[in-house]
Image (cartoon, rainbow, N blue to C red):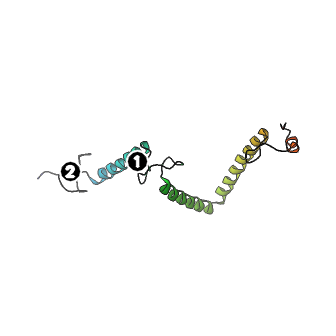
Amino acid sequence: MPIARCIDCGKGRRHVAHGGSIPKRCKSCARLHRLDLQKSKYDERRRKKLCAWCGDPLSAHSIFFCVACGSYHAGYQARLMREKRAKSPAYREDEREKVRARMRTIRAERRKAGITGNGTPYKSQATADRYGLLAS
């Protein structure tokens, strides 16, 4: 009796994923084939602008998820980041320094442009004089 061979690698097959007359794969090739199918499905959904998880249309604020899946993912990621910060005080300090540097540059740009934190121009001449700007 002939040995059933895997359609991908040609080795003897011991793993039966499904019955019938469908060509069979060995366990490792079946796993790789399943992963490839999932990746192609994910890429197809991305091209069609559908949610990577459920297939619904994407939300306006995401390139991967619909509103429901995105809110779940955001909560999950927030929990992971909280755990990461709790474990490492050095990571928290590094994050704080990066935020301080970013806000320092943003405030300097706003000050040079003569606008307040909410984007409106300085109202008083005293404020403009304090920063050496010409208020109109």
Residue at 34% in and 49% down: 32
Residue identified by numbered label 2: 22
Q: Position of residue 96 (x, y in %)?
A: 69, 54
Q: Position of residue 128 (x, y in %)?
A: 85, 41
Q: CA distance from mark 1 to mark 2?
A: 25 Å
Q: Are marks 1 and 2 in contact (CB under 8 Å)?
A: no
Residue at 29% in and 52% down: 30
Reply above or below: 37 against 18.
Answer: above
Q: Residues within 10 Å of mark 2 (few under 14, many from 20)?
A: few
Which amino acid is tagged 1? Tyr
Reply above or below: 88 against 116.
Answer: below
Disc 1, SS? helix
Residue at 54% in and 57% down: 74
Specify the quadrant that holds the C terminus. Answer: top right
Q: Position of residue 109 (x, y in %)?
A: 75, 41
Disc 2, SS? loop
Residue 19 lies in quadrant: bottom left
Q: Give the mark nearer the N terminus: 1 vs 2.
A: 2
Is residue 15 visible in this depiction of the protein? no
Whether residue 128 sits left or right of residue 39 in the image: it is: right
Residue 106 lies in quadrant: top right
Residue at 72% in and 50% down: 100
Which amino acid is tagged 2? Ile
Mark drawn on residue 42: 1
Residue 83 lies in quadrant: bottom right
Mark drawn on residue 52: none
Is residue 59 visible in this depiction of the protein? yes
